[in-house]
Amino acid sequence: MQTMRGNRVGRVSKESNRRTSGFTLIELLVVIAIIAVLIGLLLPAVQRVRQAANANECEQSLTLIGTAEGKYHNANHHFTSSLTALLPYLNQELASGQSGGYTFAVIVPAGVDGFQATGTPGLPGKTGNMTCVLKQTGPVACSPTPNADTLTSMMLMRLAARGAFEAGAQVLGSTSGITAQEIRSYLASPSTVSNVFNGLDLDHDGQVDWGDFNAVSSASPLFPFIEQIKAEMAIGAFNEHVTSLPGVKLTDLPQNLCSPEPAVTCDIFGEPPQ
C-alpha cells in the first residue's frame, strides 16, 4: 500500500491542474522530488535498459537479414546490397533500413561471394550505444559505438539542466515559503525513492516504462517536463519499438536518493550519476 506521500505523487502525476502558486508545501516538495528522482536515478536506468533492448533487437534484425540474404542467394546465385530486394524474405520496416532505433545497411564486396550487414544506432547515445555486424560466415558481433556513451552523458546533463529549470520555476512560483533545508530533508527521506517510483508507476505493474510516461496527464504540472524528456531522448526515432521497451523495477534503483545523514549533502536540483 502506498503511503500518503506516495498517493500525492500519483495525484501530481495524473491529475493535478492547480497552478504552482496554489500548491501546498508538501505538494511542492513532491514535484521537486519527482524531478530529482527522474534525473538522478530513473532516466539513467531507463536509458540503460532501452539501449540494451535496442542492441538485442539489432542482433535479431541482422540475423533476419542474414537469413533473407541466404534465401536471396539460393534464388539468384548472388548476394545483394539492396535491402528492398530482400522484401520477399524480409518485413517492410526492416527492408526500409530503419527499425528498432537502428539503421541497417548491407555491403557486397566486388568479386566476393559474400556480404556484410551492419546495424548502427540511428542516434548514437540515444537510441543505442552498440554497433553490430554480421558476415555470411559468422555470428553477429557487437562493439561499442564510438562516442555513444559520451553523447548519452551529454543528453542526461541537458535533461538535468531542464529539470533544474523546472524545479526552480516551481520554487519561484510558490507562495509556500519553502526553504533549502526542507527540500534537502524531504529528498533524504528513506521513503522518497519508493514513493516517487510508485507514483510514476501509473499502471501499477511494478515497473516504470514509457507507457507510464505517456500516461502522465496533460493537466499535471509535470507534463511539460515529461514531453521535454521524450523529445530530448528522441523516443520512437528510427522506428524504435517504444511499447516493447522494458521498464525499470524499484529493486533496480538505489533505496535512497542521497544520504540521510547529513541531509545537507543532498542536491536540491538533481543531476545524473557520474
Image: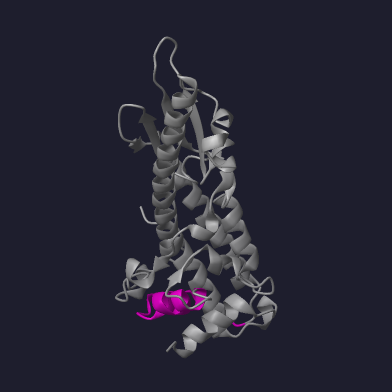
Instruction: Verify whether residue 183 appears in magenta.
Output: yes
Q: Residue at x 39, y 35 (%)?
A: 132
| Image quadrant in which the N terminus is located | bottom left
Q: Position of residue 272 (x, y in %)?
A: 42, 56
Q: Nearer the viewer, residue 36 or 149?
A: 149
For the stretch drawn in magenta, the main secondary structure is helix
Q: What is the quadrant of residue 150 in the picture?
A: top left
Q: Residue at x 56, y 39 (%)?
A: 98
Q: Is residue 157 above or below residue 138?
A: below
Q: Is residue 157 above or below residue 251?
A: above
Left or right for 176, reference 119: right
Q: Nearer the viewer, residue 70 or 93?
A: 70
Does residue 178 appear in the picture of this structure?
no
Q: Is residue 81 above or below residue 215?
A: above
Q: Is residue 203 above or below residue 70?
A: below
Q: Position of residue 100 (x, y in %)?
A: 51, 46
Left or right for 152, reference 260: right
For the magenta stretch, what is the residue range?
A: 176-200
Q: Position of residue 194 (x, y in %)?
A: 40, 77
Q: Residue at x 42, y 9 (%)?
A: 111
Q: Position of residue 108 (x, y in %)?
A: 45, 19
